[in-house]
Amino acid sequence: MNIIEEARGRPLTDPDPDAARAFFRTKTRRKIPKLTDLHSAVAEYVHDGDYLVVGGFGAVRTPLAAVHEIVRQGRRHLGFAGHTSTHDIQVLTVGDCYDRVDAAYVVGLEARGLSKAARRRFESGEVEVVEDSNHGLALRFRAAAMGVPFIPMRNTAGTDTFRFGNGKIVEDPYTGKPVVIKPALFADVAFIHVHEADIYGNARFRGIEVSDTDVANSAKRVIITAERLIPHEEMIQSPETIKIPYYLVDAVCEVPCGAYPGLMPYEYFSDEEHIRRWLEVEKDPAAYRAFVDEYVYGCRTHNEYVDKCGGRDRIMELRRIELNIDTELKQADAHQAEMRPGENR
């Protein structure tokens, strides 16, 4: 294959599908109970130096409980896929957990503003950054899920995103035209937060999916955190709703509110007030250190973190926002008023 141009970056994971396949052969595909607690899952499956992927997109269905636990357990030198990473990489910055990142979207919290702590981390020179696009990272997960070493795409050529990335421009052997190829991305460990799971690891979720099914099919170790556990018999009554099958999963953790303070579709809205506090305290190093000491290191579990942020009452407020309950109640009251005979005429 004629290589026309090579990007400056390097693949941060081994793109060889045969090397990944050799690992996958060591994993059991038996349908056995995999239920554990989040602390134990992180202790067993996340190691210093691993390449980490977290599911969700932005602050939507992101496994933030798992991210907090990774920080509390002091994991370091992680690789990370910044596939529209917002509050998750902001939390990982607390422990300086990562030192190499495939960066499509990091540091920013979308319309909320920039994380000053994450920005300082990236500007420190201690993080190896390889540029990418959201589309490019999605295709790299797809290539890994397909079991191929690379995948072609028709964008980023001629841009700095390509030059500071890890792709190659090659001559398409069929048309002779230039095409970008990207290396497969096999993660060491992935956390994916879902609405429901059973004890064997079958999982289903609603809302935006992005690359989660490809990540689950290509990561060497997959940990599911779930809003709730349901009986296996209930799960298999609708097998078509299973997005991640049990044989891909290493551990299952029941973690209610596991995406908090992010958004869990049809469950609870993001806690915008609390996320703004994160952004505000990052402006002052002393305030930032006191804040993370209280809200990250000072909480033994995610339940303690949620309780410190307002607990059940706050989650119920966010649930009302997500489900538009107040609006629907007002509409129902208005409709009932219209239906009362003799009124409003």
Image (spheres, rainbow, N blue to C red):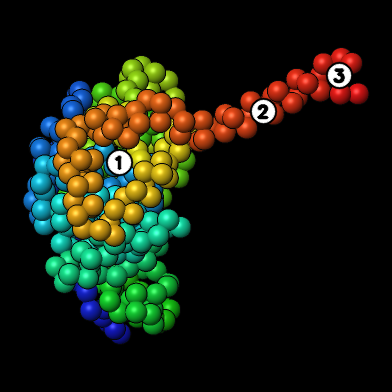
For numbered disc 2, what is the local secondary structure? Answer: helix
Amino acid bearing label 2: Lys
For numbered disc 1, what is the local secondary structure? Answer: loop
Q: Is residue 39 above or below residue 187?
A: above
Across and down, in percent, residue 271 comes to 41, 41
Q: Residue at x 42, y 45 (%)?
A: 272
Q: Quadrant of the C terminus?
A: top right
Label 1: few (<14), some (14–19) or many (≥20) C-alpha neighbours in 10 Å: many
Q: Which residue is mark 3?
A: 343
Amino acid bearing label 1: Pro
Q: Place residue 333 in its image quadrant.
A: top right
N-terminal-most mark, 2 or 3 = 2
- Which of 248/8 is in front? 8
Q: Residue at x 29, y 29 (%)?
A: 307
Q: With 188 as the anchor, is 102 left or right in this view?
A: right
Across and down, in percent, residue 154 comes to 43, 72
Q: With 332 as the anchor, is 22 left or right in this view?
A: left
Q: Which residue is mark 1?
A: 63
Residue located farthest toward the bottom when viewing the structure as drawn = 4
Calculate the distance from the C-alpha at mark 1 to the C-alpha at mark 3.
50 Å
Q: Tell me if I can see residue 309 in this picture.
A: yes
Q: Residue at x 81, y 23 (%)?
A: 338
Amino acid bearing label 3: Glu
- Between marks 1 and 3 in the image, the one whose residue lies nearer the viewer: 3
Q: Which residue is mark 2?
A: 330
Q: Is residue 319 above or below residue 78?
A: above
Across and down, in percent, residue 240 comes to 44, 31
Q: Tell me if I can see residue 102 in this picture.
A: no
Do callouts 2 and 1 mark residues in contact (Cβ within 8 Å)?
no
Do callouts 1 and 3 mark residues in contact (Cβ within 8 Å)?
no
N-terminal-most mark, 1 or 3 = 1
